[in-house]
Amino acid sequence: MSKKQKNTNLDFLSFLKYATSPYHAILSCSAYLEESGFERLDFTNYWKLEPGMSYYTILYGTTLFAFQIGKQITKEDSKFHIIASHTDHPGFRIKPNPCIYEKGYLKLNTETYGGAILNSWFDRPLSIAGKVVLKSDKVFQPKIQYFDYQLPLLTIPNLAIHMNHKINSGVELNKQQDMLPIFSLEETKDITKDYFLSFLSKELEVSYEDILDYDLSIYNPEQGCKLGLHEEFLSAPRIDNLSSVYASLKAISQTDPLSSSIITVAAFYDNEEVGSSTKQGADSYLTQIIMEKIYQGLSFSRDALNNSIARSFLLSADVAHGYHPNYGNKSDPTNLVSLGNGVVLKMNSSQRYATDSEAIGAIMQLCNLFHIPYQKFVNRSDMAGGSTLGSILSSHLPIHTVDLGIPILAMHSARETACEKDLEALSALCLAFYQHH
């Protein structure tokens, strides 16, 4: 496929099916970008960039930056249009030496990742995906293999109501005791610490002695679907925040750099659900390094980069809390955000969302120009909201920033609910943001 041709054939539910861990989300994005004519760059090399071209780079397997250099760019008027989202989702990670034998049952010892709604993970088929690290001839460069079991493998069974009559009154769950998944039935309790490694080695077709470590997530392999009388809803795992990854991925692949005078960026970070304070997270120097490498690759000066930042714009794309019809008192009384009413502009005076009236006004005008529905969200004054990539990134970069996304129900559940019209509106806004400047 020529670099001028764009692959627009990407369905959201199909994307979710294969984006089962942050690693696999990046693998899916990478494959789509390659098909769309983007050239992969090695982050550790010097970049020689050309106006009118499309590029991407991957860092640590779970973070990706895709960017396009506008053909008509000049260093005097250059600027960035960046859309940031994250690849991780709440759930569970498998600990080292995970096997626990309990009266014939074999369980896996897990650690909770992020703020998951724990009871939503009960009684579901679950699977495993992530990264396995293997021995190599180079000490500081072990081999990496990505692993996705794909089929149902585990389950976390509920306790029957007959044994816990208060279960429908609300039960506090213990993450170490109550949330361990069943892996197998075994006749012997002589389960060695290598038992799980033997399972991995068989699946990967390597010696279990070659396995050094792993970063494996437990995920919900259930397929997403449409539901509702008019099939207006989307029900699926990992809508938070792969809906934003999907929208910006499609938008940047549909943008033609030959008619542009700016640098468009789609940034996909890891570890947002645990605070972003990692080398591959947004709360690092990573974004500044990428921007510097781009300007160096264009032979633009550091001063030109610094000047461009004030002209640049960032959209922090993450899901928002939709109005819940069974819990209406949890929403702000005058700013109701409903599924089906378009993109949500998220605002907070304490800057947990990056709130900038001028920037919000600009995005409102962009929505009006392209007939994209939007709505505004603020939390109830007596409820604290979550933090976002926007507030983190704008603390490192003095850049106009707006937090936005699609409204969903059951955020951080093993399966969430959104509206297809809202995802279409977000995709249209991402495309307009890249194309109009």
Image: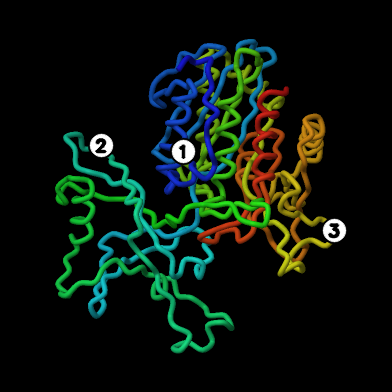
- 195 vs 294: above or below: below
Q: CA distance from mark 2 to mark 3?
A: 56 Å
Residue at the (54%, 52%) spot, across then down? 225
Q: Point out the image quarter for the N terminus.
A: top left
Q: Point out the image quarter for the C terminus.
A: top right
Q: Which residue is mark 3?
A: 334
Kindly indicate the quadrant of the structure image that contains residue 106.
Answer: bottom left
- 45 vs 107: above or below: above
Kindly indicate the quadrant of the structure image that contains residue 105.
Answer: bottom left
Residue 306: image x %, image y %?
64, 23
Crowding near the residue tagged with mark 1, few <14, some 14–19, many ≥20 C-alpha atoms within 10 Å: many
- The answer, for residue 309, to whether it is visible in the render is yes
Q: Secondary structure at mark 3?
A: loop
Specify the label residue 63 is tagged with: 1
Crowding near the residue tagged with mark 3, few <14, some 14–19, many ≥20 C-alpha atoms within 10 Å: few
Residue at the (70%, 37%) spot, across then down? 401
- The answer, for residue 274, to whether it is visible in the render is no
Q: CA distance from mark 2 to mark 1?
A: 20 Å
- Count of numbered tags: 3
Q: CA distance from mark 3 to mark 1?
A: 38 Å
Amino acid type for the residue under numbered disc 2: Phe
Q: Which residue is mark 2?
A: 140
